[in-house]
Amino acid sequence: MLFGTDGIRAKMGQAPLDAETIQRIGQLLLHTYGPGGKIVVGSDTRGSCQQLKHWLFDGFPFENILDLGVVPTPVVAFETRARGAQLGIMLTASHNPPEYNGLKFFGPQGYKLPAETAQAWSDMVENDRVPHVQNGQPELHAATPEHYEKFLLSQFAQDQFKGQTLAWDLANGAGSTWVPNWVRPLMGLQPIVGDQPNGHNINLGFGALDVAHLSRLVREKGLAGGMALDGDGDRLVVVDAQGMAIHGDRVLYGLYRAMLEEGHLVKDVVGTILTGLGLESVFRLEGVSLHRTPVGDQYVLSHMLEHGLLLGGEPSGHLIQGDLFYAGDGFLAGLRLTRAMARNPHFWAEVNERIPLLPTFEKNVEVRVKPPLSTLRLVSAAAHQLERTMGEQGRLILRYSGTEPKLRVVVESGQLSRFQGEIEALLQAIQSELGE
């Protein structure tokens, strides 16, 4: 299928991110929205974004494309809704290395495309059933994220962050030039790293997937902590005053605590199948129901919208605050958490003490194909044996990555060491039936 769990993503120049496929998508957009359809576009800092934009629009007579330039993904989503656009497009491969790129699409409400739309578009593009459209030259109009900026000003003020000195890591990505323009007026001269993009260094040694540099900076300067975004700014990883990355379950609980302190009644929180049992047990004690969805922030968002819920997220750092805006927004989450830290200097110490983390085994296994797991005899047998042995003392999660040729294996248990033999047998079965 053309669309993965988060739009289209591949190495630049390789299918489906090749010129022919992207031009078909451009044809499809023109056929769907017409020349006058309003489309909001943004991009991260990859050097290939200009080429990708050229393939997508050149040769087609679009008249109303608003180009925000380099901005985080949630800004594109917000501006799409605020400007009454039919579609938003973000050119990014998120946390992936520089040689990758991709496309994320947002509907008129600023939400990611429904699965049925993505499926229909995939069928038309992959089967070359896109209707012929008129050729012509597009009109791209430079625009600024003025609506999102006004929104930030309405939610946060300088006096809410007094006494907080944190480091920010922007992954040499989409937030590199935009975020500093907001961090410094709100919080003063904060240390910022990962803000020197050159077109080829996004996510390399900086950002949410590699916080070593940020952690060292926090320790050396004695800062209150650090906030790391990923390449397109929709994910947040938090580092405490000791330079240790705070587990994503604890960050989600931190947002829950912050919202309670601000007067919001939060009785339901949305997580995924990867959300830990420790967080679930604490929520249960506090009278909060944890709803689980498949992995992917679009599933979290869909569940939140369906049930009218205000908070959801993934351990990986996608965090959605429905009282502000229904989109994963790392910067927005970072601002709210920083404000909570300013109110309470012991905020993270209290959160860490409150939420237990059960021992967890995690491994990403390279696979050559992705057949349904239920059809794999050896894997099914080994998985069943592990689950039977653990009983109610643990759980197993097996899932294919939506963007990479990998099978993710997660085992969580308070007595994990007892099950090492069964885990190793499962890994051998996976290698036997799926390994290269």
Image (tube, rainbow, N blue to C red):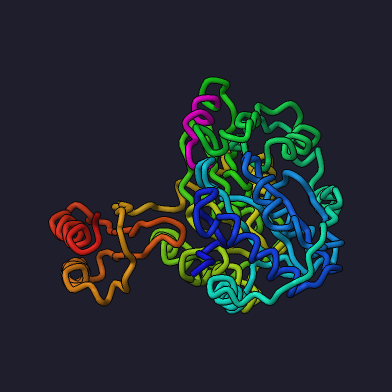
> What span is colored magenta in the figure?
208-217
Q: Position of residue 77 (x, y in %)?
A: 72, 59
Nearer to the camera, 415 or 94: 94
Position of 37 compared to 304: left or right? right
139 above or below 221? below
Q: Is residue 238 magenta?
A: no
State the image coordinates of residue 27 (x, y, percent, origin top left).
70, 67
Q: State whether residue 360 appears in this view.
A: no
Q: Residue at x 54, y 48 (%)?
A: 12
Residue at 48% x, 42% y: name it. Answer: 209
- Residue pictured at 42% horizontal, 66% vertical: 273
Q: Quadrant of the C terminus?
A: bottom left
162 over 401 or under it: above or below: above
Please give left or right for residue 231 compared with residue 30 in the image: left
Tell me where residue 285 appears, x and y as whole percent: 46, 66
Where's residue 160, x and y in %? 76, 41
**At 64% from the left edge and 53% from the top edge, which residue is drawn?**
258
- In the image, taking residue 370 as reference, residue 432 lies left or right, namely left
**Nearer to me, 287 or 430:** 430
Residue 169 visible? The answer is yes
